[in-house]
Amino acid sequence: MTEITMVTGAGGGIGAETGRLLAARGHAVALLDNQSSVHDVAADIKAAGGQAISVVLDVVDETAVEAAVQQTTHELGSVTGLVNCAATMTTGPITETALDDWNRVMAVNATGTFLTCKHVIRSFVATGTAGSIVNLSSISGWVGLPNQPAYCASKGAVVQLTRQIAAEFAQQGIRCNVVSPGSVRPISCVATWPRRAIPSLLRRRWSTGTRSDGSPLPPRSRRRSPSS
Ligand SMILES: NC(=O)c1ccc[n+]([C@@H]2O[C@H](COP(=O)([O-])OP(=O)(O)OC[C@H]3O[C@@H](n4cnc5c(N)ncnc54)[C@H](O)[C@@H]3O)[C@@H](O)[C@H]2O)c1
């Protein structure tokens, strides 16, 4: 049976590569993004012999999300999987974060994930499909990082929504898992960071060199990498 997988944020970055990888492994993919670059990704996949459709939409538009699930079912078959990669972020201290920026990040990252999960799970249940959902959170969804109040909160919401869905639908064989990457490059999310600043940002974030009581960590711990 062919897997039919929807991928949001598939117009670039991790979402586009996920779409390409799934297609190379035989999935028919429905690629969703709010940028028209998603059509180019689908065209590449089709040129390589894969099966793909592409839809330009905003993941916070429930009508469009529901229509995309219907279109996928109509053109490719009943949906068996979903990967939620669409996301946005703002940076800056909470004291300088505009309400509009907070609302947009929460909407795209948390509400968008909720909406796609909602309509894909409806499809799973209606067709008796033991489908699989993978939601992209971030290290920022697990620990507090400076200057990312909305992003950290929204990615924490993605982690907890994933747990909730997994618990609620496990008995129907529907799986929901979260992936929480560290920094992956190339990435448009952090494209505004000065390239040479990234290593020092990571060192500052992940190795303060002190314990919570202020005493120095042993040298080995100070050298710990983000992925350790
Ligand atoms: N790249 C990293 O270092 C990193 C680290 C941790 C977590 N992540 C997470 O991985 C996922 C993919 O990250 P990425 O680096 O590929 O990001 P990216 O910015 O390259 O890609 C995100 C995609 O989402 C799309 N998008 C944004 N708002 C949308 C909306 N409202 N509706 C539909 N599409 C929308 C963008 O057009 C873009 O194509 C995100 O959830 C991100 O939070 C990335």
Image: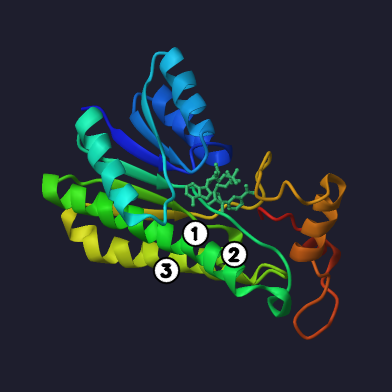
**Tag 3–tag 1 contact (CB < 8 Å):** no
Specify whether residue 48 is in view.
no
Q: List the residue tagged with mark 1.
A: 109
Quarter of the view holding residue 207: bottom right
Disc 3 versus disc 1: nearer the observer? 1
Quarter of the view holding residue 165: bottom left
Element marked by disc 2: helix
Element marked by disc 3: helix
- Taking 188 as reference, is 154 left or right? left
Disc 2 versus disc 3: nearer the observer? 2
Residue type indicated by callout 1: Asn
The answer to whether 137 is drawn above or below residue 92 in the figure is above
Specify whether residue 106 is in view.
yes
Q: Which mark is residue 151?
A: 2
Q: Is mark 2 within 8 Å of ligand 1?
A: yes
**Tag 1–tag 2 contact (CB < 8 Å):** yes
Q: List the residue tagged with mark 3.
A: 160
Q: Earlier in the sequence, mark 2 or mark 3?
A: 2
The percent position of residue 45, horizontal first and vertical second, equals: 45, 21
Q: Residue at x 83, y 49 (%)?
A: 194
The answer to whether 176 is drawn above or below residue 213 in the figure is above
